[in-house]
């Protein structure tokens, strides 16, 4: 009986300690940086965040509130949302601090150019911005365009441009193996700030690396030197950019029309439109990987970088031709990554240092005479 009593006392003490830690975490920390919000279906966007869940604002975006007007609206996917960093360290938030002006973050993972245009038309213009910056990510924005037109009848009209063919299969890949205690970990991620804080420490890097190794099919590349410790995933489920794929070719043509529609909207509503061209992690580290002999050693890596360069050249040429302002973020990211890692271990999203480089580059552009 004494042993059972001690075990009960220990269990109660442990539960109370965890509850106290959770209460303290919620008092000190902002839930928007730690809790998963509630996703709901949307006819035009496929999905969106339910307002006021996970610390998000009334519109379901990563801001403290939804203002009546702002100077700058930033639209994009998870790269703009700021995955892998706190809300205050996302590049839209940092840009607002640098410029001492109001900036609204309208980014969410899984979105692509068609969603950007829809948000621009339906919500961004309500904030009467002077400037709208669209974060175009080369990693999967073309994939998102294709899938949106292929499977959402609201946007099927874009699939009838010229001789496009958008009837091929979707970009879909086999789901990776489940995580250890996945259901419990997912529930804690939605409800416990303390759990989210704990799992983001470097102490859990070994778990993340182990899970990556378990899912690896020979496509994981590890790079180490005195300043860097990074992993790169180049499997079929991680690389969608193949400029020889008819689906990507169609997506490129659709994206060009979507960008024209963005430009027309900017002219009609009187805001300044700027595209921020966001490279992949592999492309940012490309020079370092080349110097280390990795590009010659790994043909899949060489092809990935080549495909992205072809896509970038195509987009940049179109933007020049169409008189659409843009900022290519690659040169500054390449320069800064030589000094330190700009991405977390095993994650394709920048860390707070990487997002700061993006914000500072955009700030310099806005200050220049264009």
Image: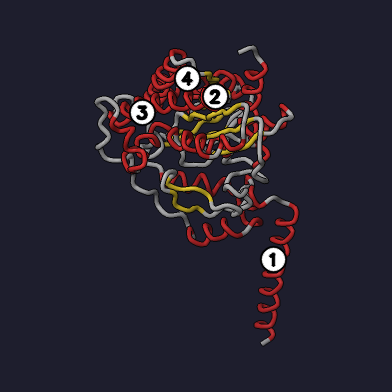
Question: In the image, residue 171 lies at what x, y percent?
Answer: 33, 39
Question: In the image, residue 157 lies at what x, y percent?
Answer: 32, 35
Q: Is residue 285 visible?
A: no
Identify the residue at image location x=39%, y=48%. Answer: 176
Question: In the image, residue 355 lies at what x, y percent?
Answer: 62, 31
Q: Mark 4 Cα within 10 Å, few/some/many (few <14, many 20+)?
A: some
In the rendered image, the vertical position of residue 128 relative to residue 13, given as above or below: above
Query: Which residue does the numbered mark 2 point to in the structure image?
Result: 273
Identify the residue at image location x=37%, y=29%. Answer: 241
Query: Which residue does the numbered mark 3 point to in the structure image?
Result: 254
- Chosen colour scheme: secondary structure
In front: mark 3 or mark 1? Answer: 3
Q: Are marks 1 and 4 in contact (CB under 8 Å)?
A: no
Circle number at residue 290: 4
Is the C terminus in the top left, top right, bottom left or bottom right quadrant? top right
Q: Nearer the viewer, residue 177 or 23?
A: 23
Query: Which residue does the numbered mark 1 point to in the structure image?
Result: 19
- Closer to the N terminus: mark 2 or mark 3? 3
Q: Mark 2 Cα within 10 Å, few/some/many (few <14, many 20+)?
A: many
Q: Nearer the viewer, residue 241 or 200?
A: 241
Q: Quadrant of residue 21?
A: bottom right
- Closer to the N terminus: mark 1 or mark 4? 1
Q: Are marks 2 and 1 in contact (CB under 8 Å)?
A: no
Identify the residue at image location x=39%, y=31%. Answer: 142
- Closer to the N terminus: mark 2 or mark 4? 2
- Closer to the N terminus: mark 2 or mark 1? 1
The reply, left or right, for residue 29 in relation to residue 331 is right
Q: Nearer the viewer, residue 80 or 181?
A: 80
In front: mark 2 or mark 1? Answer: 2
Circle count:
4
């Amino acid at each position: 009986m004494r042993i059972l009593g001690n075990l009960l006392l220990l269990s109660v003490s442990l539960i109370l300690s965890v509850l106290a830690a959770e209460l303290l975490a919620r008092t000190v920390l902002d839930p928007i940086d730690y809790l998963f919000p509630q996703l709901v279906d949307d006819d035009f966007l496929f999905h969106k965040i339910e307002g006021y869940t996970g610390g998000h604002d009334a519109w379901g975006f990563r801001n403290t509130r939804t203002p009546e007007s702002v100077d700058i609206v930033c639209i994009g996917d998870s790269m703009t949302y700021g995955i892998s960093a706190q809300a205050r360290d996302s590049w839209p938030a940092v840009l607002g601090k640098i410029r001492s002006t109001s900036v609204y973050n309208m980014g969410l993972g899984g979105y692509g150019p068609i969603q950007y245009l829809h948000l621009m038309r339906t919500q961004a213009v309500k904030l009467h911005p002077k400037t709208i910056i669209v974060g175009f990510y080369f990693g999967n924005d073309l994939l998102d365009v294709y899938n949106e037109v292929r499977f959402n009848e609201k946007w099927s009209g874009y699939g009838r441009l010229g001789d496009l063919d958008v009837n091929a299969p979707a970009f879909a890949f086999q789901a990776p193996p489940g995580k250890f205690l996945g259901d419990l970990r997912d529930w804690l991620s939605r409800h416990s700030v303390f759990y989210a804080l704990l799992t983001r420490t470097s102490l859990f890097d070994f778990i993340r690396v182990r899970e990556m190794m378990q899912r690896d099919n020979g496509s994981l590349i590890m790079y180490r030197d005195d300043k860097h410790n990074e992993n790169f995933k180049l499997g079929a489920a991680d690389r969608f950019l193949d400029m020889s794929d008819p689906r990507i070719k169609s997506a490129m043509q659709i994206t060009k029309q979507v960008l024209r529609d963005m430009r027309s909207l900017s002219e009609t509503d009187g805001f300044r439109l700027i595209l921020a061209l966001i490279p992949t992690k592999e492309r940012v580290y490309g020079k370092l990987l080349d110097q280390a002999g990795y590009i010659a050693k790994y043909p899949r890596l060489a092809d990935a970088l080549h495909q992205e360069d072809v896509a970038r050249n195509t987009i940049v040429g179109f933007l020049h031709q169409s008189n659409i302002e843009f900022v290519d973020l690659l040169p500054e990211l390449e320069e800064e990554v030589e000094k330190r890692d700009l991405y977390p271990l095993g994650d394709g999203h920048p860390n707070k240092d990487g997002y700061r480089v993006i914000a500072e580059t955009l700030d310099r552009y806005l200050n220049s005479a264009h």
